Image (cartoon, rainbow, N blue to C red):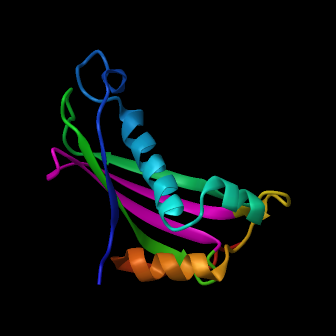
Amino acid sequence: MEKKFKKLFETRWSDFDANHHMRHTVYNDCAAQLRLDLLIHNGYDMRTLSKLGLGPVLLKEETKFIKEVHIGENLTVDVEIIGLSKSGDRWNMLHHIYKNENILAAIITVEGAWIDMKLRKLTPPPKELNDKFLENYRSGKFKWIEKRLK
């Protein structure tokens, strides 16, 4: 069963450019905030991650813009897990950004990883975190991430 974490974002005057549509970076900022909110919602705030010596890092971010967002239109952003390595050190997430709740405005796909903050190397997170994410936010498009070639 496909499950998503989502949140409403109210747009602000500073989110818009001279063309009267939302700046391209705002889409990615909302997606990044949602990923942080997802961690917090599941008991992994920045303080907890710091105690674990763990941090999320982005390896790749791709945005497909579909519809303009204008001043006064709010965003609903969702996220789901579309990929995970067997060890859990790498992950892929998919975001849908809707304006006015149901008009698809953008799709953001991110590839990320967990990093050991002291060693500065990829590391698996606690098993509980992976289990919780797979149980609660696994997409119908989910695929296991293959090992990287060296």
Can the viewer see residue 146? no
Asked if residue 12 lies left or right of residue 69, the reply is right
Query: Does 140 appear above or below 21?
Result: below
Can the viewer see residue 74? yes
Which x, y percent locates residue 99? 19, 44
Residue at the far top in the pictured view: 18
Query: Does 29 appear above or below 104?
Result: above
In the image, residue 37 lies in the stretch drawn in magenta: no
Prevalent SS, magenta region: strand
Query: Does 122 appear above or below 102?
Result: below
Residue shown at the point (58%, 54%) measured from the top left: 58
Task: Quadrant for the N terminus, please.
Answer: bottom left
Quadrant assignment, res 118: bottom right
Asked if residue 46 lies left or right of residue 62, the reply is right
Which x, y percent locates residue 120? 80, 57
Residue at the far right in the pictured view: 119
Along the viewing direction, whichever of 62 and 126 lies nearer the viewer: 126
Asked if residue 89 lies left or right of residue 21, the reply is right
Which x, y percent locates residue 92? 49, 66
Along the viewing direction, whichever of 150 and 126 lies nearer the viewer: 126
Magenta stretch?
Answer: 89-114
Query: Does 41 appear above or below 142?
Result: above
Residue shown at the point (29%, 33%) measured from the top left: 11
Residue shown at the point (47%, 55%) measured from the top left: 37
Numbered-mark total? 0
Task: Quadrant for the C terminus, please.
Answer: bottom right
Along the viewing direction, whichever of 93 and 49 lies nearer the viewer: 49
In the image, residue 111 lies in the stretch drawn in magenta: yes
Which x, y percent locates residue 84? 53, 76
Asked if residue 111 lies left or right of residue 139, the reply is right
